[in-house]
Amino acid sequence: MALPKINPENTNAWNALKAHFNTLKDTHLKDLFTTNPDRAKELSLTWNDFFVDYSKNRINTETKKLLLDLANEVKLKDAINAYFSGDIINETEGRAVLHTALRSKKTSIAKVDGENVIPEVYQVREQIKAFTHAVVSGEKKGYTGKAFTDVVNIGIGGSDLGPVMVTEALQYYKNHLKTHFVSNVDGDHVQEVIKELNPETTLFVIVSKSFTTQETLSNAETIKEWFLQTATQKDVALHFAAVSTNTKMIDQFGIADENVFPMWDWVGGRFSLWSAVGLSISLAIGYTNFEALLDGAQEMDSHFKDAALEDNLPVILGLLTVWYNNFFGADTEAVIPYTQYLHRLPAYLQQGIMESNGKSVDRFGNATTYQTGNIVWGEPGTNSQHAFFQLIHQGTKLIPADFIGYKRSLHGKTDHHNKLMANFFAQTEALMNGKTFTEVTTELKAQGLEENEINKLAPFKVFEGNKPTTTILIDQLTPKSLGALVALYEHRIFVQGVIWNIFSYDQWGVELGKQLAKTILKDIENSEITKHDTSTMQLLQKFKN
Ligand code: F6P
């Protein structure tokens, strides 16, 4: 079954939400709490070791009901079934979307073109396991007989962001191998990484779903050239591994067959960390931890597939985005993890969310008449509090924010963790409550200020509050809970794409820039510049001179 095609604006729920928005838009969150003492309990969900409190959002019971009506009217349940069944829901590329199969139980069935793909998935998982064991134990050696000490992941986009985000996030679980990531085609990036490496003890993993990506192939060639300054061509087979759907191109690079890890076109690049694209994760934290990451994601998959819409975390969070994006007109959302380990999560989510839902044509092929993809950004707390929080508190824009925090830290530094979490809770409270004129003047009076000074200062010190936040409180940062968290956001992206009636799993917009870069590269390398607009011509001339 294809995804249902329903224009959300034509649903009864959308129109009811529009009317409802007018009745609620000026209501302060504080008043919503005053009028309903059970609000916190009613608008929160417990799932495994997650507690999600979404009561500090500008919704009431009626909003929730109407958003769920919208989900029903666009047939979200049918869409979820089509997604998990391996149907061709990526219609513009003619592909299924089955990253969920990568973390499915061994006994489950996921069919693509009538074939169950689970046995193949598990075959590759066995290959990852054996390879990881051989490298981590030192059994697998480099060309001078030394064990590997360093692993370099060469890839970009989904072939980089997932591995780097997870490896950083799970640093606490890391073994002795040092992991490095080369992504940008900027030669200074690869050079800075190479300068720390010893070719005798470094393993390179080239990750590219297509194996045609300019950045990755250039970096792989540069690294190979550097490697061959001390080693020979036959040593390439010992030091290089590759992950791709394009095994023909890998052959040409000289990679040994046993170091080639297949992937499949039904796995989108930005959802691929669960496949062999995550090889550098497995190498960094060991296969058992990698498997736990997959298990966590699998549990979230089951929740998303089976839970009723009103108790379903990705559904509720996805609907909240639609509420702010389409009714409040909020353009952006912040994701603030209160752990330094998740410092790459916002960058990772930017690709997942913005490459997926940055679309302006609906599933009928028509231009959408409503807003789609939300912009996402963020940085860990408490650093972000000292950077951009001012604008969230007192700026003119509405920026809903997700706060992600953990009950327990990993190193057990209770004093630090209590301070960190005090900030975590304080910020969402401050964003909601703000500070009234009366509170400000009372405070200034207590500080001994004169009335005229108080009147002058007070307007600047008033915080309107009423800024929405969602709190995701998790027991501890483990491979399993991280897997579940990432899967939660993946499914949230799906929910939003279904509501907006767009195709979330292609990325044609990225292709145009790639094509033009090829033409411009020729202009840079050749003496003649071909025809461009006058601004581009002028810039190219300046660059070449
Ligand atoms: O940016 C476009 C894109 O196709 C991403 O979707 C993908 O993750 C990235 O390029 C890298 O592609 P590949 O893994 O084929 O090298």
Image: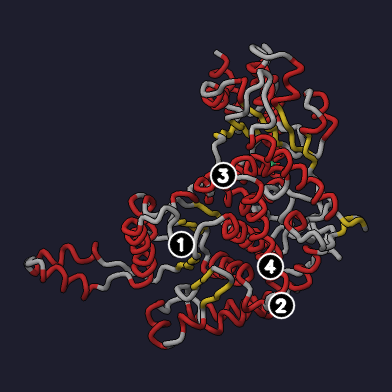
N-term mark: 4 or 1: 1
The residue carrying mark 1 is 406
Tell me the distance, in whole angstroms, between the alpha carbons under discs 4 and 1. Answer: 31 Å
Name the quarter showing ligand 1: top right
Q: Within 10 angstroms of label 1, few (less than 14), some, or many (20 or more) residues?
A: many
Helix, strand or loop status at disc 2: helix
N-term mark: 2 or 4: 2
- The x, y position of residue 168, in whole percent, is 52, 44
Q: Within 10 angstroms of label 4, few (less than 14), some, or many (20 or more) residues?
A: many
In this view, the mark in front (2 or 3): 3
Q: Residue at x 73, y 49 (%)?
A: 268
Q: In the image, which disc is placed on residue 72? A: 2
The quadrant in which residue 147 appears is: top right
Q: Are marks 1 and 2 in contact (CB under 8 Å)?
A: no
- The x, y position of residue 136, in whole percent, is 63, 37
N-term mark: 3 or 1: 3
In this view, the mark in front (1 or 2): 1
Name the colouring of the figure: secondary structure
The residue carrying mark 4 is 499
What's the residue type where badge 3 is placed?
Thr
Q: Within 10 angstroms of label 2, few (less than 14), some, or many (20 or more) residues?
A: some
The residue carrying mark 3 is 167
Tell me the distance, in whole angstroms, between the alpha carbons under discs 2 and 3. Answer: 38 Å
Tell me the distance, in whole angstroms, between the alpha carbons under discs 2 and 4. Answer: 10 Å
What's the residue type where badge 1 is placed?
Tyr
N-term mark: 1 or 2: 2
Q: Quadrant of the N terminus?
A: bottom right
